[in-house]
Amino acid sequence: MSDSGTLGGVVYECMRCGTQVTVEELSRLPEIKCICGFRVFRKARQPIVKQLKAV
């Protein structure tokens, strides 16, 4: 739906269907539930992987 990098907003993803929802969209709903009816969300990770230099 929206880009995960917009203004530092946290994006959550439905565990069943994978629909991505922002915190603002979840706060507008009367209950925390996906459009598919599932109530379990996880925080979506950014696609960029951090690489560390070996010591």
Image: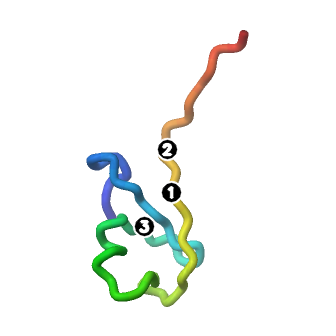
Q: Determine crowd level at label 1: few under 14, some 14-19, many 20+ residues with C-alpha closer than 10 A.
A: some
The disc at residue 17 is: none
Q: Name the residue under label 3.
A: 20
State the CA–CA distance, disc 3 to disc 1.
Answer: 8 Å
Instruction: Tell me the kind of residue under disc 2.
Output: Pro
Query: Which corner quadrant holds the C terminus?
Result: top right
The disc at residue 47 is: 2
Name the side, left or right, on which 30 lies relative to 55: left
Instruction: Please tell me whether residue 5 is drawn above or below residue 15 in the rendered image.
Output: above
Name the side, left or right, on which 10 lies relative to 41: left
Position of residue 37 measured from the top left corner of the image (x, y, whole percent): 49, 90
Instruction: Tell me the kind of residue under disc 1.
Output: Ala
Position of residue 42 measured from the top left corner of the image (x, y, whole percent): 56, 65
Instruction: Please tell me whether residue 15 is drawn above or below residue 39 in the rendered image.
Output: above
Query: Which corner quadrant holds the N terminus?
Result: bottom left
Labels 3 & 1 near each other (Cβ < 8 A): yes
Q: Determine crowd level at label 3: few under 14, some 14-19, many 20+ residues with C-alpha closer than 10 A.
A: some
Q: Mark 1 points at which residue?
A: 44
Residue 32 in which image quadrant: bottom left
Picture residue at 40% right of the left edge, 56% below the top: 10
Instruction: Please tell me whether residue 47 is drawn above or below residue 15 in the rendered image.
Output: above
- In the rendered image, the residue lying farthest to the top is 55
